[in-house]
Image (cartoon, helix red, strand yellow):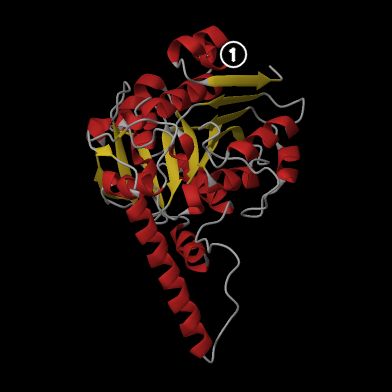
């Protein structure tokens, strides 16, 4: 965490310097083909944006901004690369926690899906056409035995060590909520710097904070910031938990419309999200959609699947004022027509 902060501090004041770049899924299906960028002046983050940024801005105007926090609060955003690339192709600049990484997206998802297969889905097909099957009983037993052996060996080694310390009670994270505000600060500086490639390209009056799973807790931790105009909670909810410094008390600090996209009862975040929905105050508009996709959503499907479609519609409505996109969230008949298996609730509209 300290090293990340030092690297970020060292980059302050530097002009944006694109160091790495790649195209994912031919740049998405939106009107502006997207690209994934690693910037030398902001090494702890990855930027998803339209290609030919200046040309896009000349046609459409300054682009709304998204700051994104990863599932498991990882310092790596590869697993969400398909969705973020797709969103960017509709005219958004998304800055995600985690340095630029050219790792194989499908390789990342293969392991995730096999270890947490969504039981509510009959078949899982990834964007590359590969079908993923759940672990067999023998494979899961072997996995559990290997994990138990690793724990036993670690405990045995710890007992022999003179520097023995108490075992951690929870996962150790390398990211923190404030990173979302730090990268928003970097984008703000770049937007004001005439020497930056982002100069006057960003609409900082229209900013969304988005996070998946543990990343949603990080979103709640910064949602009080007045610059954040909407929050997108993907397979996430705080419930009665305390995570990344966030608790149910954070819900009292909300001031913007909230969108929860949840994977139904098979989603580990389902219970927490239901509690959030009930607790969010009467002054905050909130929509919750539930699918049958479990905790992994559809992020491994081509162009991020239906979850990406829903996210784009929400952002187009909330950040670009495209009222027509609100039908998915406000009209039950339209929701049933577009996504027959989804369920939706809303309040305070």
Q: Would you say 136 lies left or right of 293 here?
A: left
Residue at 36% x, 32% y is 304
Using the rendered view, name the quadrant where residue 206 is placed.
top right
Position of residue 273 measured from the top left corner of the image (x, y, whole percent): 63, 36
Residue lying at the far top of the rendered structure = 333
Position of residue 179 measured from the top left corner of the image (x, y, whole percent): 53, 52
**On screen, 243 above or below 6?**
above
Q: Would you say 262 lies left or right of 281 here?
A: left
Using the rendered view, name the quadrant where residue 281 is placed.
top right
Residue at 22% x, 31% y is 26
Q: Could you say which is closer to the camera, residue 222 or residue 164?
A: 164
Mark 1, secondary structure of its residue: helix
Q: Could you say which is closer to the camera, residue 153 or residue 112?
A: 153
Residue at 44% x, 13% y is 338
Q: Would you say 308 lies left or right of 230 here?
A: left
Mark 1 sits on what residue?
Answer: 330
Q: How many marks?
A: 1
* Residue 172 can be seen, yes or no: yes
Residue lying at the far front of the rendered structure = 138
Split into 4 quadrants, where in the image is the C terminus? top right
* Residue 227 can be seen, yes or no: no
Mark 1 Cα shell of 10 Å, populated few (<14), some (14-19), many (≥20): some
Q: Could you say which is closer to the camera, residue 16 or residue 133?
A: 133
Residue at 70% x, 48% y is 247
**On screen, 235 above or below 153?**
above
Position of residue 154 measured from the top left corner of the image (x, y, whole percent): 46, 77
Using the rendered view, name the quadrant where residue 60 is placed.
top left
Position of residue 118 measured from the top left corner of the image (x, y, whole percent): 42, 38
Q: Could you say which is closer to the camera, residue 112 or residue 23?
A: 112
């Amino acid at each position: 965490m300290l090293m990340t902060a030092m690297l970020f501090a060292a980059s302050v004041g530097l002009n944006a310097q694109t160091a790495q770049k790649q195209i994912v899924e031919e740049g998405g299906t939106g009107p502006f083909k997207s690209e994934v960028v690693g910037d030398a002046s902001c090494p702890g983050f990855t930027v998803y944006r339209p290609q030919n940024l200046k040309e896009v801005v000349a046609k459409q105007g300054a682009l709304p901004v998204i700051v994104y926090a990863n599932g498991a609060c990882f310092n790596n955003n590869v697993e969400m690369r398909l969705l973020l690339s797709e969103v960017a192709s509709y005219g958004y600049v998304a800055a995600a926690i985690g340095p630029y990484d050219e790792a194989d997206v499908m390789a990342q998802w293969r392991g995730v899906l096999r270890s947490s297969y969504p039981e509510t889905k009959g078949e899982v097909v990834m964007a590359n056409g590969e079908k993923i099957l759940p672990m067999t009983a023998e494979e899961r037993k072997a996995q559990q035995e290997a994990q138990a052996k690793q724990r036993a060996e670690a405990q045995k080694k710890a007992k022999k060590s003179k520097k023995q310390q108490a075992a951690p009670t929870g996962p150790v994270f390398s990211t923190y909520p404030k990173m979302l505000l730090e990268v928003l600060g970097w984008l703000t500086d770049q937007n004001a710097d005439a020497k930056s490639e982002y100069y006057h390209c960003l609409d900082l009056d229209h900013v969304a904070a988005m996070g998946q799973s543990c990343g949603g807790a990080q979103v709640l931790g910064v949602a009080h910031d007045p610059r954040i105009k909407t929050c997108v909670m993907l397979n996430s909810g705080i419930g009665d938990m305390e995570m990344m410094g966030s608790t149910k008390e954070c819900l009292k600090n909300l001031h913007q419309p909230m969108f929860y996209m949840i994977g139904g009862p098979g989603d580990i975040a389902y219970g927490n999200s239901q509690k959030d929905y009930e607790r969010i105050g009467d002054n905050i508009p909130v929509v919750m959609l539930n699918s049958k996709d479990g905790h992994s959503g559809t992020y491994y499907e081509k162009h991020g699947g239906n979850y990406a479609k829903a996210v784009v519609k929400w952002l187009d409505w909330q950040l670009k004022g495209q009222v027509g996109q609100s039908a998915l969230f406000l009209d039950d008949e339209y929701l049933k027509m577009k996504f027959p298996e989804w369920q939706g609730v809303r309040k305070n509209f």
